[in-house]
Image: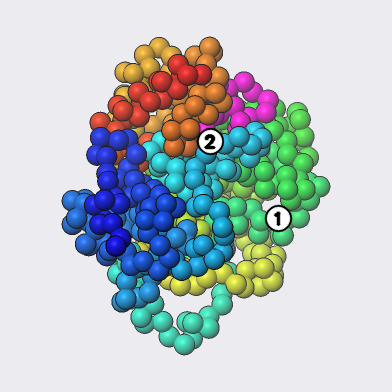
Amino acid sequence: MAPSTKELIQLDTSATQPIHLQIYNRFKAAIESNLLKDGDRIPSTRTLASELAVARGTVESAYAMLLGDGIFESRGQSGTYVSSLLRKTSTKKLRTVSPPTSSRATQTANLELAPSISHVYLPGCPAFDAFPRKVWARLSGHRMRSLSAEEMRLKEPQGYAPLRQSIAAYLRLARGVVCEPDQIFITNGYQGALDFLSKVLKFQGESIWMEDPGFLLAAMLLKDLGANIVHVPIDDEGLIVSAGIAQCPDARLAIVTPSHHSPLGLTLSAERRMKLLEWASQKNAWIIEDDYDGEFRYSGYPLPSLKSLDQYDRVIYAGSFSKTIFPSLKIGYIVVPPGLVDACQEKAFIYQRGFSITSQMVVNDFITEGHFSRHLKKMRDLYAHRRELTSKALVDVMEDHIQVSSHKNGMHFVAALDKQYADTAVCTNFNQLGYGIHPISTWTVGATHNGLIIGFTNVPNKRVAEETAIKLRNSFIAG
């Protein structure tokens, strides 16, 4: 006889690990120890939430992860079951989280891949507990129920036309980007945008400016595409354009994060923006503006985009719904200058024909019905609050050993460390507890930086903020 749910799922409400991750890990452990077997029926989300006295959305989050990992399988109205294919496809135990031990170049990638890392402190993740799941489920269900034969056949290499129209309207109001829908191309996230642009602009063998420190995964992708990365240092005003010109004046492309530098959080000054645009115009070079979380600014209004200042038509604007909706959606977009539209359309016809249309339809409905703008406003207020909770707890617990960045924007901040502590050692010790913070030293090659990249969007309350800060402090001691 199978044990009861309460025997299998014993929660620790005093633990730092979120409840949905505890449920996720308890089910995995029960399957590994054969307490649950292939084909066993799992309680509904409503039933389990009632038995555990937790919110139904919390259980739904855990079930979504287990379904996504192939551990559970849904059989429609029949219910949810332990996957019958689980042990047939592998004789190994279900994967457990271990701290990254790989080379410096792939540490961040390994953290991105691990499914059961705690979202507390994890950079780049929106607040999963605050996402309007019911609205999203209703929109998704409606689209799937009403999908016509024509829509089921539909392939739009450039992206779903109504969504491109909605993005154009949104960018005009929110980011100051004036463009036509024909200039917008839907991509498979930001990295999909870089991959697509490599087909258009032919990155192989070309020199590309990148900020140092800069987005690690983008640098890895560009190197793999055969580009020559020119690491350009930054200072308090952002990218040092004169340094880039001195190192490689004839670079084909510059990739920048002007509204919220990744990862330091500063903004590119107005003077540097104009110098960068002038250089691109003089050298016939392109600029990719990665506006990955420019919507989130907690003092004053969101800054205008670099694209909005571009009178030379040299800026390619790259946006994504990964930070504003959720990462696994994998929908990004680029806005290209008019002179690049034809070349992009030609390549899209070849390379973009298999892109899913249904998720684009749901995103468009989310925007046009007003949910997107309301969600962004709610998240700005929530993130401002959670940033203060997280930073105050760290400063109170760490005292003089840590200095939290003063930039009040984005979804993470950098905490600079006292020189006696190595950021890599601190991260290794802390991440052994199931977390996923990044050492900033792995994001730079030329400059000397020692600090932690800490996300704050999934720190739900003061208690969790303080308990997590204490665990981080103990990792300093261990290191």
Please give left or right for residue 195 compared with residue 15 in the image.
right
Is residue 301 visible in this depiction of the protein? no
**Label 2 Cα crowd, 10 Å radius (few <14 / some 14-19 / many 20+):** many
Query: What kind of colouring is applied to the model shown?
Result: rainbow
Q: Residue type at mark 1: give it.
A: Ser
Q: Tell which tag, 2 or 1, sits nearer the viewer.
A: 2
Distance of label 2 from label 1 (alpha carbons) = 33 Å
What is the x, y in percent for residue 232? Answer: 67, 31
What is the x, y in percent for residue 427? Answer: 51, 28
Give the labeled residue for mark 1: 198
Residue displayed at 44% across by 60% down = 71
Residue displayed at 60% across by 72% down = 354
Task: Please tell me which of labels 2 and 1 falls first in the chain.
Answer: 2
What is the x, y in percent for residue 151? Answer: 47, 82
Q: Residue type at mark 2: give it.
A: Pro
Q: Is 446 one of the magenta-colored residues? A: yes
Q: Is mark 2 on a helix, strand or loop?
A: loop
Quadrant containing the N terminus is bottom left
Q: What stretch is highlighted in magenta?
A: 438-452
Residue displayed at 47% across by 19% down = 478
What is the x, y in percent for residue 251? Answer: 75, 41
Give the labeled residue for mark 2: 99
- Residue 211 in the image: above or below residue 370: above
**Label 1 Cα crowd, 10 Å radius (few <14 / some 14-19 / many 20+):** some
Q: What element carries label 1?
A: helix
Q: Quadrant of residue 15?
A: top left
214 or 66: which is nearer to us? Answer: 66
